[in-house]
Amino acid sequence: MTAASPPPLNPGAPGLAPAPAADFGGKWAALLQAAGVVAALAGRTGESIRAEVRDFPQAMAAAGGWRLALAAQGVDDLAAVMEPGLAALLAIHGRGADPAVAAEALWEEFAAARGALLALLPPPVA
């Protein structure tokens, strides 16, 4: 599999159907908000959201096909990691403990997953 060729897809495989664009965009926005909270708990400040990150759902909707299907699954997978992780960090913070180290680990996981998702963007047209 390369960036230009799609991975083999089993048409009947569960989880490979693209999510509706509005749902996908909403999940992405929620992930970015959660990541902002994680970054703050990790002591990271002043990081702005790049346009390619902010506009990721629209770019994936335009790409469609296998890219959108993989991106939708990746967003769901990332949400499955971030939701309990953020809940744990907020519980730690709520008890008055410092969640910075754990938050930094979750931030690094988010950043790696975000990078993998952004790699699904179609190559720029020359």
Image: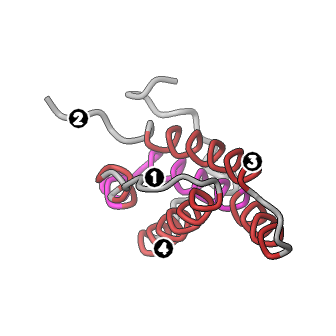
Residue with the mark numbered 4 = 26
Which class describes the residues within 10 Å of circle 3: few (<14), some (14-19), or many (20+)? few
Q: CA distance from mark 1 to mark 2?
A: 16 Å
Q: Is residue 68 within the magenta segment?
A: yes
Taking the view exactly as shown, the residue that stands out farthest to the right is 95
Mark nearer the N terminus (3 vs 1): 1
Whether the residues at callouts 2 and 4 have beta carbons within 8 Å, the answer is no
Residue type beneath disc 4: Gly
Mark nearer the N terminus (1 vs 4): 4
Residue with the mark numbered 1 = 68
Which class describes the residues within 10 Å of circle 2: few (<14), some (14-19), or many (20+)? few
Q: Nearer the viewer, mark 1 or mark 4?
A: 4
Residue with the mark numbered 2 = 124
User: Circle 1 — which element?
Assistant: helix
Residue type beneath disc 1: Leu
Query: Whole-percent x and y of residue 53?
Result: 38, 52
User: Circle 4 — which element?
Assistant: helix
Q: Nearer the viewer, residue 17 or 117?
A: 117
Q: CA distance from mark 1 to mark 4?
A: 15 Å
Q: Residue at x 48, y 73 (%)?
A: 26
Which class describes the residues within 10 Å of circle 1: few (<14), some (14-19), or many (20+)? many
Q: Nearer the viewer, mark 3 or mark 1?
A: 3
From what the image shows, is residue 17 above or below residue 87? above
Q: Which residues are magenta?
A: 58-81
